[in-house]
Image (spheres, rainbow, N blue to C red):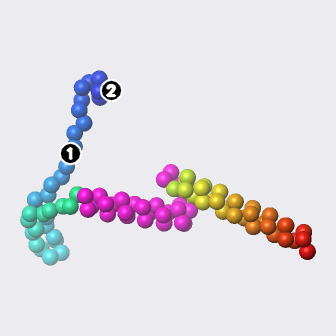
């Protein structure tokens, strides 16, 4: 729809030029933000949070396919272990 209306995407950003710290009653000027570093850190944090959510089986849209994959893997391991026990039990 936006293409038909000839609407072009654009980027909107926020560049702070000062910040106030109420705890220290101090104003900071000329703030520099490392966009690439922050993005890298955000991706790293997301990855850790996702791994933790999967490990505790937190059922949300983002984790369900990982949880189900993990369950399927555990099912295969259990089947292999039980079939090996049956084979060993029959040989004695």
As displayed, is residue 85 above or below residue 50? Answer: below
Point out residue 16 in the picture as x, y percentages from the top left corner.
14, 58
Residue beneath label 1, please? 12
**x and y, in percent, of residue 82 in the image:** 78, 66
> Taking 51 as reference, is 7 left or right?
left
What residue is drawn where x is 54% and y is 66%?
A: 56
Q: CA distance from mark 1 to mark 2?
A: 21 Å
Location of the N terminus (image quadrant): top left
Report crowding for label 2: few under 14, some 14 to 19, many 20 or more residues within 10 A (C-alpha): few
Q: Residue at x 90, y 69 (%)?
A: 90
The residue segment tinted magenta is 36-62
The quarter of the rendered structure image containing the C terminus is: bottom right
Dominant SS of magenta comes to: helix
State the image quarter where residue 88 is shown.
bottom right
Answer left or right for 67 relative to 7. right
Q: Residue furthest bottom?
A: 24
Instruction: Please state if 34 lies on the left or on the right of 62 as rendered.
Output: left
* Contact flag, marks 1 and 2 (Cβ < 8 Å): no
Instruction: Report helix, strand or loop for mark 2.
Output: loop
Q: Is residue 6 magenta?
A: no
Helix or strand or loop: what does disc 1 sit on? loop
- Classify mark 1: residues with Cα within 10 Å, few (<14), some (14-19) or many (20+): few
**Which residue is tagged 2?**
1
Q: Earlier in the sequence, mark 1 or mark 2?
A: 2
Please state which of residues 58 and 54 is positioned toward the viewer in this rendering.
Answer: 54
Residue 84 location in percent, x, y? 79, 67
* Residue 6 position by quadrant: top left
Which residue sits at x=66%, y=62%?
A: 74
- The spot of residue 44 in percent (x, y) is 37, 63
Nearer-the-camera pick, 38 or 90: 90
Q: Is residue 53 magenta?
A: yes
User: Vertically, is 8 above or below 89?
Assistant: above
């Amino acid at each position: 729809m936006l293409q038909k209306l000839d609407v072009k995407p654009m980027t909107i950003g926020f560049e702070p030029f000062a910040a106030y710290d109420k705890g220290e009653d101090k104003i900071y000027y000329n703030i520099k933000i490392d966009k690439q570093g922050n993005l890298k850190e955000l991706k790293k944090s997301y990855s850790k949070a996702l791994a933790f959510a999967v490990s505790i089986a937190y059922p949300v849209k983002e984790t369900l396919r990982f949880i189900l994959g993990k369950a399927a893997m555990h099912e295969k391991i259990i089947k292999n272990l039980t079939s090996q026990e049956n084979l060993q039990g029959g040989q004695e």
